[in-house]
Image (tube, rainbow, N blue to C red):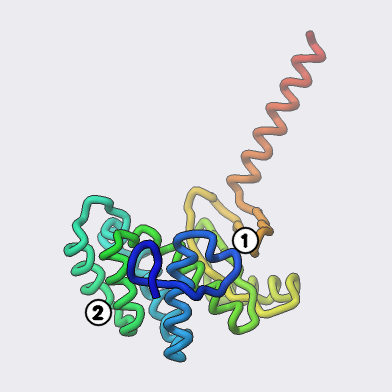
Amino acid sequence: METSDGNLGAGFSGGGIQASLSGRYATALFELANDAKAIDMVEASLMRVRAAIDQSAEFAALIASPIVSRADAAKGVAAAAEMIDVDDTTAKFLGVLAQNRRLSQLPAIIRAFRALAANHRGETTAEIISAHPLTDAQVDALKTSLRARVGREVAVDLSVDPALLGGLVVKIGSQMIDSSIRTRLNSLAHKMKTGDEHVAGAKG
């Protein structure tokens, strides 16, 4: 299989996911995992990679840096892959990303792969962004609520954004539910500004 980046390939399935570079890489990896009957194993490895990005500033800097050489990037991700015990397919895939200077796409690739895996299992994927890490009980409650809303099993992709201040942002396909404190404050500020303008206009 080959793409314009040279090492991963054609024969994609996955609809709109293929429209982006990260989606094409994710689809190529999904096809490799499917052929090897290792979708769950690869997904678990990718979640460990996602955790490493979130928890290690050094690893996050490595994948984001545009100046690290291909060789150094490959050595870095190989060492990380061994440390967090990812499977061989995922480890080789990380090496390809390093050689193609596409490591910065990793977070988006992981999200796209999880969406493909969820669809393969007959599930819907929900991206959940919270101001603070959610407890297992909170995640289970969210899954139950979302399952009732969409009428099917829901796989969740969790991430943390302290800038939200509190609350959640939930994305399911093209739908977004934003209950974050930041958005509420922005909305309140807009209403207050609009109100002030109305008052000023009335006085004028």
Which label sits on residue 82? 2
In the rendered image, the quadrant that contains the N terminus is bottom left
- Tell whether 24 sits left or right of 55: right
Instruction: Give the quarter of the image for residue 115.
Output: bottom right
Q: Position of residue 177 (x, y in %)?
A: 67, 57
Residue 140: percent from the left, percent from the top? Answer: 61, 77
Label 1 Cα crowd, 10 Å radius (few <14 / some 14-19 / many 20+):
many
Tell me the amino acid under the disc marked 2.
Glu
- Report which quarter residue 142 is drawn in: bottom right
Q: Which mark is residue 187?
A: none
Contact check, label 2 and label 1, Cβ < 8 Å: no
What residue do we see at 30% from left, 77% from top?
A: 92
The residue under the point 23% across, 73% down is: 78
Identity, as a three-letter code, of the amino acid under mark 1: Val
Q: Nearer the viewer, residue 173 or 129?
A: 173
Residue 170's tag is 1
Q: How dense is the environment of label 2, judged by Cα within 10 Å: few (below 14), some, or many (20 and up)?
A: few
